[in-house]
Amino acid sequence: MAPWSGFWERNFFAQVPLVAAWLSNAFVRGAVSGVGVITASAGLAELAGAFGLRRRAASSDEPTG
């Protein structure tokens, strides 16, 4: 659920007045977007690290000479 999508304003919890005011706040939308960017970046870094580690382990198992 992205804060810039229409679903953000039309979900079940947005019907509650207190929550609707909170969800329409630009700072909340920016914070949710920022957390999403950080999470996606961390996931990509983990993925790159996993592939890099696997590649290094496979190359160190090969006999030299």
Image: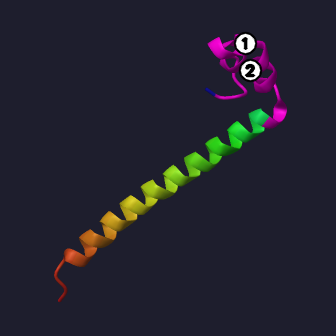
Image mark for residue 42: none
Question: Which residue is farthest bottom?
Answer: 65
**In this view of the protein, which residue sits in the foreground, 28 or 53?**
28
x then y, percent, for residue 2: 65, 29
Q: Quadrant of the N terminus?
A: top right
Residue that appears at 69% across and 39% down: 33
Q: What SS does tag 2 mark?
A: helix
Query: Where is mark 2, residue-wise?
Result: 19
Position of 30 relative to 9 (above/below):
below
At horizontal 25% and vertical 77% (from top left) the residue drawn is: 60
Residue type marked 1: Val
Image quarter of residue 26: top right
- At a point 82% along the width and 29% down the height, the residue shown is 25
Q: Which residues are magenta?
A: 2-27
- Which numbered tag is attached to residue 16? 1
When the figure is inspected, residue 39 is found, relative to residue 65, above or below; the finding is: above
Report crowding for label 2: few under 14, some 14 to 19, many 20 or more residues within 10 A (C-alpha).
few
**Residue 37 in the image: above or below residue 42:** above
Query: Would you identify the image quadrant in which residue 16 lies?
Result: top right
Q: Secondary structure at mark 1?
A: loop
Residue 48 in the image: x percent, y percent? 45, 59
Horizontal arrangement in the rendering, residue 18 relative to residue 42 (left or right): right
Q: 59 or 12, which lies in front?
A: 12
Query: Is 12 colored magenta in this rendering?
Result: yes
| Residue 44 position within the rendered picture, expressed as x and y whole percent measured from the top left | 50, 52
Is the magenta region chiefly helix, strand or loop? Answer: helix
Q: Is residue 33 left or right of residue 63?
A: right
15 vs 36, left or right, is: right
Cβ atoms at labels 2 and 1 below 8 Å apart: yes
Image quarter of the C terminus:
bottom left
- Across and down, in percent, residue 54 comes to 31, 64
Q: Nearer the viewer, residue 57 or 20?
A: 20
